[in-house]
Amino acid sequence: MFLSLRKKEILMLSLFLWTFRIFAGDFIQGIYAVPVNETDIAKAKELGFTYMHCYLNPYTKEGYATAQKQLELAEKYKMKVAFDLFTRVLIGKKEALTELTRIVRDFKNHPALGAWYLYDEPSSKEMKHDLWIFYSTVKRETPDIPILLCLAQNESWRTFIKPCDILMGDNYPVRDEPFPEAPLHYFTNFLHDISRCNKSFIAIPQLMCWSSYPDRVKEFNQHELRYPNETEIRCFFYAPLAMGNMKGAFWYSYYDIFYRGRQDGRKNSDFIKKIAPLIHEFRDFVSLLKDPSHPRVFQWAEGNQFQMALFDGINGKQYLVLVNLWPLKRRFDRWTERILSDGRNLKPWRFTRNIQAETLNGKFVLENPWINPWETIIWEVEKL
């Protein structure tokens, strides 16, 4: 019994070290549902994404060929693939492990393979055993390739924390509400819970309009369904980043914005124009950071619906990220919590509203202390 437990401990430690090594310095900007053709994959690359995912069944002849093509095109455009193992079709199947192992062995050495995508939104607690067996099988075959698991915010999501290396969490809160009334805290609260599960996580933010799924939003005003705006998209990215343990974002979804029209017949071109500058902005900011997954989080601010963290940058610089996690303009009057010393000037970074600030007597002193609903502010920290 002792030896069995000891082996399990060693296995879990090994998985942690593998995950840390693989993901150190590899911050993901991915996008879901990219059709497997040269035009769309080139477009995903142009928009600034570094990873892609496609829903396909590799256990069929057609799906296998498409999976191979996906990897080849991703390599051509210098992208990585979160390869969908589509294990939903293996649940309860007698030859499940044989088929899973075959697919893993066939594709595991491809240079464009970035991660395995184990399952999409498990919900039944009875699946826990199957997913652990699938995870163990894949990890045994490919110990150096991280395994992702997408979780929806359902009653049983905590049941599925173990069978993966990296957790993923989704919630798409922008529906028919006018700004700033959409409940973005549904997303940020869920990601906060995931970030406290002692595992790295990847956020799955909303990059779609619910008009793409009319049967699921019948109770909402169909004519008011909308895409998230720039403030909301920034909140989706910077708030979980400032929670710590975040290894990237995987936006949902490419297919929605390029292949699904709106209910009123309008095209998505206006929204598409906003995406590339934002994704490149996120990549630019992360590239400034020494270790984007491990900031110093301001706990007292977090308890007051502000998400705030201090990041060490390259070349000795530091950056402070602040997000208002509430649909109201709120006064920011917070202590520095001994994370940031006195005598620091806070210089607004790029898109940030020009709010001059400094640290004095253990507090943040802002020229204008009112933070707008869902607003993100980033300061570069300078010595006075």
Image: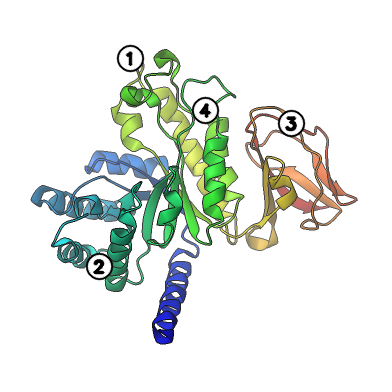
Q: Residue at x 31, y 54 (%)?
A: 126
Query: Residue 208, percent across and down?
Result: 40, 31
Residue 379 position by quadrant: top right
Alpha carbon separation for disc pair 3 and 4: 20 Å
- At label 3, counting other C-alpha atoms closer than 10 Å, the crowd grade (few under 14, some 14-19, many 20 or more) is some
Alpha carbon separation for disc pair 2 and 4: 40 Å
- At label 1, counting other C-alpha atoms closer than 10 Å, the crowd grade (few under 14, some 14-19, many 20 or more) is few
In the image, 93 versus 100, the foreground residue is 93
As drawn, 285 above or below 128:
above
Asked whether the residues under the numbered discs 3 and 2 touch, taking CB atoms below 8 Å apart as contact, a structural biologist would say no
Q: Is residue 164 visible to the viewer in this orientation of the structure?
A: yes
* Lower position in the chain sequence, tag 1 or tag 2: 2
Is residue 335 toward the left or the right of residue 299 in the image?
right
Which residue does the numbered mark 2 point to in the structure image? Answer: 109
* Of marks 3 and 4, the one in the foreground: 3
Asked whether the residues under the numbered discs 1 and 4 touch, taking CB atoms below 8 Å apart as contact, a structural biologist would say no
Amino acid on which the number 1 mark rests in the picture: Gly
- At label 2, counting other C-alpha atoms closer than 10 Å, the crowd grade (few under 14, some 14-19, many 20 or more) is few
Which residue does the numbered mark 3 point to in the structure image? Answer: 330
* Lower position in the chain sequence, tag 2 or tag 4: 2
As drawn, 370 above or below 123:
above
Amino acid on which the number 4 mark rests in the picture: Asn
Alpha carbon separation for disc pair 1 and 3: 37 Å
Q: Which mark is residue 265?
A: 1
* Of marks 1 and 3, the one in the foreground: 3
* Lower position in the chain sequence, tag 3 or tag 2: 2
Q: Which mark is residue 229?
A: 4
Q: How did the renderer colour the structure?
A: rainbow
Query: Residue 140, percent across and down?
Result: 30, 73
Alpha carbon separation for disc pair 1 and 2: 44 Å
